[in-house]
């Protein structure tokens, strides 16, 4: 029933919005990426990508050209299996360096700036997976080993935690982002639903404003607009209005929802990264 609703909304959206424009920035056949896992659009227009299989973080411009590559530094040297990436205040770029169990901080030009060894409450090293940054510069990290979301201040002090082995809401997240309007948002692989809580990781609950929409894999947000990857569609929700486009209509299939990562620029331009094929597209969706 939900999939029928999404397909119907997709058809209405495409008919009502003829100015939808999709551009290929990095093609699957010529891609320099190897098993990329995440992207983040910077304020200056650069798109930061965790090039996981090549153990590096890169930046591409709006034409899809690689213009920057991460420098080495810190106790562990080069990155090892980097995954989540996020941009913070002042152009800081953070990456979850999963293989080295740390968060690495870079400048917007991808020059090494600092690092945080990620540890659980007992002091044991754990793997970071997803990252998000709020409007005051605090960093949110999902720790895979102890299934917790942790908020750090700008000095890397732990402010609060959510989840753990007894947590009901933090269960196998597939994505995470921060929105000033809605707090911390994340999608759950276990339920296929969207959840959120406030900036201090209090009051976790299902994001009921989108109704019964499920089979969700990815979430990102810009101002009051929430963008989601559903089973076979890109979904946009803004203050009660729900629009959708199917992958088939966008003509970038065949795709699996679990392979797609997305982020949105300050101007509303959507970027779609296919982690399986290594391709990158921009989407103008008025």
Image (cartoon, rainbow, N blue to C red):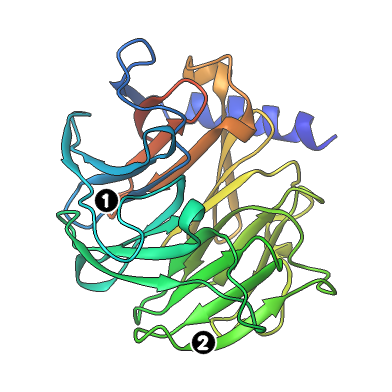
- Circle nearer the N terminus (2, 1): 2
Q: Which residue is most to the top?
A: 29
Query: How far across and down, in percent of the image, does residue 42 sit?
Result: 26, 54
Instruction: Please give the name of the residue rendered at 59% of the width and 80% of the height, measured from the top-left corner.
Output: 198
Say which residue appears at 68% left-offset and 44% top-offset: 216
The x, y position of residue 260, in whole percent, is 53, 34
Q: Which mark is drawn over residue 99?
A: none
Q: Residues within 10 Å of mark 1 (few under 14, many from 20)?
A: few
Asked if residue 266 lies left or right of residue 149, the reply is: left
Q: Residues within 10 Å of mark 2 (few under 14, many from 20)?
A: some
In percent of width and height, residue 66 lies at 19, 33
The image shows residue 75, relative to residue 201, as above or below, that is above
> The N terminus is located in which quarter?
top right
Horizontal relation, residue 44 to residue 234: left or right: left
Q: Could you tell me which quadrant the C terminus lies in?
A: top left
Between residues 135 and 12, which one lies in front from this camera angle? Answer: 135
Mark nearest the camera among 2 and 1 is 2
Q: Nearer the viewer, residue 77 or 121?
A: 77
Seen in the picture, residue 51 relative to 142 is either above or below; the reply is above
Kind of element beneath mark 2: strand
Cα separation, mark 2 vs mark 1, equals 33 Å
Please tell me which residue is depicted at 61% across the width and 58% down the height of the picture: 240
Position of residue 190 in the picture relative to residue 89 (left or right): right
| Image position, residue 145 (x, y; %) | 68, 63
Q: Which mark, residue 267? A: 1
Is any atom of residue 205 visible in this view?
yes
- In the structure shown, which secondary structural element does the residue marked by tag 1 occupy? loop
Determine which residue is flagged by label 2. Answer: 158
Residue 233 position by quadrant: top right
């Amino acid at each position: 029933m939900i999939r029928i609703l999404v397909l119907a909304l997709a058809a209405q959206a495409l008919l009502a919005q003829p100015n939808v424009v999709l551009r290929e920035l990095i093609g699957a056949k010529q891609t320099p990426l190897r098993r990329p896992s995440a992207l983040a659009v910077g304020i200056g227009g650069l798109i930061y990508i965790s090039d996981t299989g090549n153990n590096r973080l890169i930046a591409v411009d709006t034409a899809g050209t690689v213009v920057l590559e991460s420098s080495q530094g810190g106790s562990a040297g080069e990155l090892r299996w980097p995954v989540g990436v996020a941009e913070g205040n002042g152009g800081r770029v953070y990456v979850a360096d999963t293989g080295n169990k740390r968060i690495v901080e870079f400048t917007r030009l991808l020059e090494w700036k600092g690092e945080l060894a990620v540890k659980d409450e007992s002091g044991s090293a754990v793997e970071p997976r997803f990252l998000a940054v709020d409007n005051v510069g605090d960093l949110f990290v999902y720790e895979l080993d102890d299934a917790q979301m942790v908020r750090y201040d700008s000095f890397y002090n732990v402010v609060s935690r959510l989840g753990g082995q007894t947590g009901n809401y933090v269960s196998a997240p597939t994505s995470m982002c921060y929105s000033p309007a809605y707090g911390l948002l994340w999608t759950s692989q276990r339920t296929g639903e969207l959840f959120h809580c406030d900036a201090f990781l209090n009051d976790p609950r299902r994001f009921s404003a989108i109704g019964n929409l499920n089979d969700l894999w990815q979430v990102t947000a810009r101002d009051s607009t929430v963008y989601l990857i559903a089973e076979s569609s890109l979904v946009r929700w803004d203050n009660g209005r729900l629009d959708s486009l199917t992958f088939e209509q966008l003509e970038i299939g065949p795709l699996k929802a679990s392979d797609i990562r997305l982020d949105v620029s300050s101007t509303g331009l959507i970027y779609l990264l296919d982690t399986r094929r290594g391709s990158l597209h921009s989407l103008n969706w008025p």
